[in-house]
Image (cartoon, coloured by chain):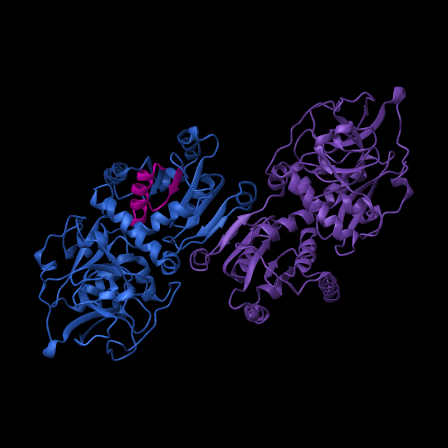
Chain colours: A blue, B purple
Amino acid sequence: MATQFGRIGGAKLKSPALTSVRWKSGPYGYTQAKALVFSQYGEPKDVLKLHTHSISPSLPSSSILLRTLVAPINPADVNTIQGTYGIKPKFTSLIGTPEPSAIPGNEGVFEVVSSPPSSSGLAKGDWVIPAKTGFGTWRTHAVAPADGVIKVDKEGLNPLQAGTVSVNPCSAYRMLRDYADPALREGDWFIQNGANSGVGRAAIQLGRLWGYRSINVIRARDSETATQALKDELLALGADHVVTEEEFMAREFKDRLAEWTRGTGGTGVRLGLNCVGGKSAQTIAKSLGTSGTMVTYGSMGRQPVALPTGLLIFKDLRFVGFWLSRWADGNTVAKARTVNEILDWTRQGKFKDTPVVDIPWNWETEETPLKEAVQGTLEGFRAGKGVFVFGET
Amino acid sequence: MATQFGRIGGAKLKSPALTSVRWKSGPYGYTQAKALVFSQYGEPKDVLKLHTHSISPSLPSSSILLRTLVAPINPADVNTIQGTYGIKPKFTSLIGTPEPSAIPGNEGVFEVVSSPPSSSGLAKGDWVIPAKTGFGTWRTHAVAPADGVIKVDKEGLNPLQAGTVSVNPCSAYRMLRDYADPALREGDWFIQNGANSGVGRAAIQLGRLWGYRSINVIRARDSETATQALKDELLALGADHVVTEEEFMAREFKDRLAEWTRGTGGTGVRLGLNCVGGKSAQTIAKSLGTSGTMVTYGSMGRQPVALPTGLLIFKDLRFVGFWLSRWADGNTVAKARTVNEILDWTRQGKFKDTPVVDIPWNWETEETPLKEAVQGTLEGFRAGKGVFVFGET
C-alpha cells in the first residue's frame, strides 16, 4: 500500500525543496502548521486527524521554532496510538485541537528556523533531533525548549540519515554493548531474529564494525529467489550467517550452530536479540551458550516468551528487556554521543541507511494518505520503513 | 510413607549412638561400609541398590576416613538418579560395585575418624561437610581428600543442623544477597512461592535477620485449619504476609500488594524467588516492581515460565536462574563463610532448622526402606525433608 508514495530505498534525498521550503505563512508573521493528532486510542486510520494551526512569532525566550525535515513511522508509534504501548501520551489542547490530543512520533530531524537563544549553542539552520521520546514528530513544525533537542552535525548527511538514527541504530548499539556480561569482545557471537528489521540491519553493521559475529534469523519470503536475495543483502551488510525461521527451528540447526561456533572454546553464542517472541524466542534462548543473555526488545509475534526452567537454572541464562525510551530519557548525554558516533560511521560510508518508503508530506497533502501510511506499518511485509518526508509545497 | 521412619520436626538429635557408634569392623582393621548406589537412571525404587564394601586402613596420605552423621534427601538428588538433572554423575567401580555406579547425595555432615594429615587443619573427631557437589553422601563412610571437605565448628550444634545447612539455607542466602540490582536493603520487599520449602523457610528467616520484608505463597493444605496452621508457622518464622496460591492469583491480590508495599515510594517488590514455574511464576513476575528480578531455582510444577513481553520491556524485569552447584563449586571459600555465618545464627537460636523426617540408617537397615524413603521425596506433601540419620548398630 505504502509504495504508492514513491521510491523505495535509502537513496540520498537531494530535493531542493528540503532546503528551501515555502510553507504557508499566516498574517503578522504567524507560521501556518499542520500536525497529525489523536484524541482517543484506536486504529490509526480511525483516530488520526490532520490538524491545522498557527504558531505565534513571539516565542518564549528559551524556545525555538523547528521545521520538520523527516519523521519515521516506528512500530512503537503505532502501538502508542492503539493504546498498547508501555507509556501513555499526555492529551493536551496546546495546539488548539477541539479535544485534548496528542501528536504521535518519537523520531525525526528538524531544522532550526527561529533565532535560538545564544546560550543554547544552536544557530538558525542547524539540524536537531528530539532529546527524549514523546516529542511528537509527525507535524510540519514544532516549538520546543532549546534543551529539548540534540544538535546533529549535518555536514555530509542527508535528512533521512539524521532522522532515522535515534531509534533503530541506537537500540542495536545499546543492546550489543550493554547487556552481555561480561561485555562482548571481538570475535564473540550474537544471534538475532527479525534480522532484516531496522534494528537487525543496524546490529549486523555495528557488530561487524566491532568485530562481533552474527547469526541472523529472517522470515522466508514468498519465493526462494526473494529469500535468497534478502539473505545476500544481509550478508553484504556484514552478517556471518543468515537462516530462515524454518531452518532455525529445524533439528539440524543445533549441529550447524556447533560447527559455526566451534572456535569459541565452549562459550558459544553469548547474546541473543529477540523481537519476535514465542517459539522463535525459545529457539534463540536454546542457541545461547552457558551464561548467555537474551534481550527482548519487541514482540512481533505477540506470543509470550516461554522459558524452560532448565535453561534458566543449569545454563545460567539471563533474560532481560530493552526499552529505548528508558535508556534515552535517562541518558541524554549518552544518547547524543551514541547518535553522533553512528552518524560518523554513516558519513564514512561504514554504516548504511535502512531501506525506507518515502511518504511525502506537503502543505497540500490530505489526511487520508497520511493516516493510511501509518495504518500500513504493522501490516504484512513492507519494502522498508515508512518515513514522512516534509517539504514540497 | 516416610513417617514410618520416626519422629517429625527439627528437634535436637541427642541419641548417644551418634557420638559413640559401633560400626562393623572387618579383619585387619578394615572398615565395613555400606552405600546406596545406582548404575543406571530411573526411579529410585527401581535403580537404587545397597552395596556393602570394605575400606582399607591404609589410606592415601592426603585422604581422610569419614563416618556419616546425617545426609538429607534433596529433590536434586532424586532428579540426579532419574537422569533429569543438569549434571550427570560419573559412574565408577571405585567401591567395587559389580557395575560402574554412582553414589547419590550432595549434602551431609561427617565425622573425621582417621588421623588426618597435619597440614589439613583437621583433627580426628571434627565435623566436615562436602566442599563441592557430587560428593555422594548416602553412605555410612567415605574416604575423601582433605581439601574436599569444609570443617564446621560442631560446638553448640547437632548433626542435623550442620548436615542440612549447605543446600537450602545457602541457596536462600545467595539468592537474597546476590541477585537484586542494586542489592536489597533493609525494608525492601521480596516475594516467593513454595514458601514452606526448606529454601522458603530459610529465606523468611534470613530476610528477617537482614530486615527484608517477605510475601510468601504456599499451596493450600487439605483443610482451612491446616492451611492456617502453616501460615501461622511461617509468620512465626518472620514472614510478613503469607497467602495461598489461590489468594495470590485472585484479582484482588494486586490491591493487597499495593497496600502492603505502599511505603516503598513506587519501588514495590524488588526480588522474586520462584521454584514452581507456570502460572505461579508469571504471577510472581507481575507482582514485581519496575526493574525487579525474578530468580528461578526450581520447577515443582514442571511448567515453563511464560513471560509476557511487556513485563520484560516496559517494566525492565530481569529473569535469571540460580543453581547452587554452580555457585558453590566455584566458590569454596565463600561457601565456607556462608555456611559458618548461618551456623552462627543457628547457635544463637536466630535461625531454626527446617522440619525433617528422620530416616534411621543402621548396619542392619535393609535396602527397601532406604530406597522407599528416597522415592517418597517427590511425592505429595511430606511433613518435612527426609534425612538419613546414621549411627545405631
Q: Is A43 included in the stretch rendered in magenta? A: no
Q: List x then y, in percent, for residue A210.
A: 34, 39
Q: Is residue B167 visible?
A: no
- How many marks overall? 0
Picture quarter with the C terminus of chain A:
bottom left
The foreground one among B259 and A162 is A162
Q: Is residue B296 above or below residue A82?
A: above
The foreground one among B164 and A304 is B164
Left or right for A158, reference B311: left
Left or right for A226, reference B249: left
Q: Is residue A154 above or below residue B60?
A: below
Q: List x then y, in percent, for residue B184.
A: 58, 57
Image point 61% across, 53% down: which residue? B176
Q: Is A191 included in the stretch rendered in magenta? A: yes
Identify the image quadrant of residue B228. Answer: bottom right
Image point 81% across, 20% down: which residue? B58
Q: What stretch is highlighted in magenta?
A: A189-213
Q: List x then y, in percent, for residue A160.
A: 20, 53
Residue furthest front in the image:
A119
Image point 69% across, 49% down: which residue? B169
Q: List x then y, in percent, for residue A65.
A: 20, 69
Left or right for A203, reference B303: left
The foreground one among A327 and B138 is A327
Identify the image quadrant of residue A230. Answer: top left
Q: Can residue B368 be seen in this view?
A: yes
Picture quarter with the N terminus of chain A:
bottom left
